[in-house]
Image (tube, rainbow, N blue to C red):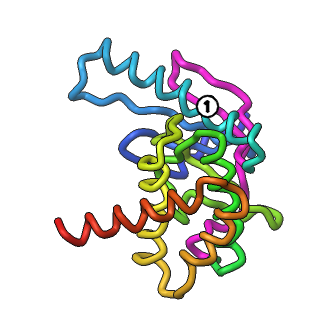
Amino acid sequence: MQTNQLIASGAEAVIECSDHRIIKRRVSKRYRLPDIDTRIRAARTRSEAKLISEARRCGVPTPIIYDIDTAEYTITMEFIEGPRLKDVLDHNLCEEIGELVGMLHDCGIIHGDLTTSNLILHEGRVYLIDFGLGYFEKSVEAQGVDVHVLFQTFVSTHDESGLAEAFSRGYKRRFAGANQVLARVREIEARGRYH
């Protein structure tokens, strides 16, 4: 029997690896009443699993879900091996990210934490991971915020220019509402500058 190895710990969850599987466990929040805490963790566990599965059905590469345990607040899923895109990003990968996010938004899914740390390159394909902050929504504002977060990552983490443009090319190929969303991203950026 292989023991679980802790590979990441965040505000919402701990991530363990065991036998080429990832176990994501939502942690308790001491500031919440126990009854509310258990309901929130169970609901978020179900919601994240549903988002990952729905994204996969829409053609977006995501980990395969093996098990959901709402009593233990865990999702057991496929371990996606490979570098995070933050370490290997180029213009071609940005176009591919654009296509994947376009497919996601076309299906009414907001990732909620689109960063190059939540994208993994595995056997030549980009996989989206960590839907812990995701939700179902089709509004231009929500889609714009999703893309804005990614563009902020390009600026803060990657010094190469043209990444947003490469993303936009892929995004427009896969999502009919892309121009509207990209216009909203510019509005969101402007709001940030004037506040």
Crowd around label 1: few <14 · some 14–19 · many ≥20 (10 Å)? many
The residue drawn where x is 39% and y is 17% is 38
The residue drawn where x is 46% and y is 32% is 26
| Amino acid type, label 1 | Ala
Mark 1 element type: helix
As drawn, the residue found furthest toward the top would be 35
**Image: 20 above or below 25:** below
| Residue 8, magenta (yes or no) | no
The answer to which of 83 and 192 lies nearer the viewer is 192
As drawn, the residue found furthest toward the left would be 195
The residue drawn where x is 54% and y is 18% is 70
| Residue 83, magenta (yes or no) | yes
The answer to which of 65 and 112 lies nearer the viewer is 112
The residue drawn where x is 68% and y is 34% is 54
**Residue 64 in the image: x percent, y percent?**
75, 39
Where does the C terminus fall, quadrant-wise? bottom left
- Give the residue pinned by disc 1: 49
**Residue 108 in the image: x percent, y percent?**
59, 39
| Residue stretch in magenta | 62-87
Say whether residue 19 is visible.
no
Q: Is 22 displayed left or right of 66 in the figure?
A: left
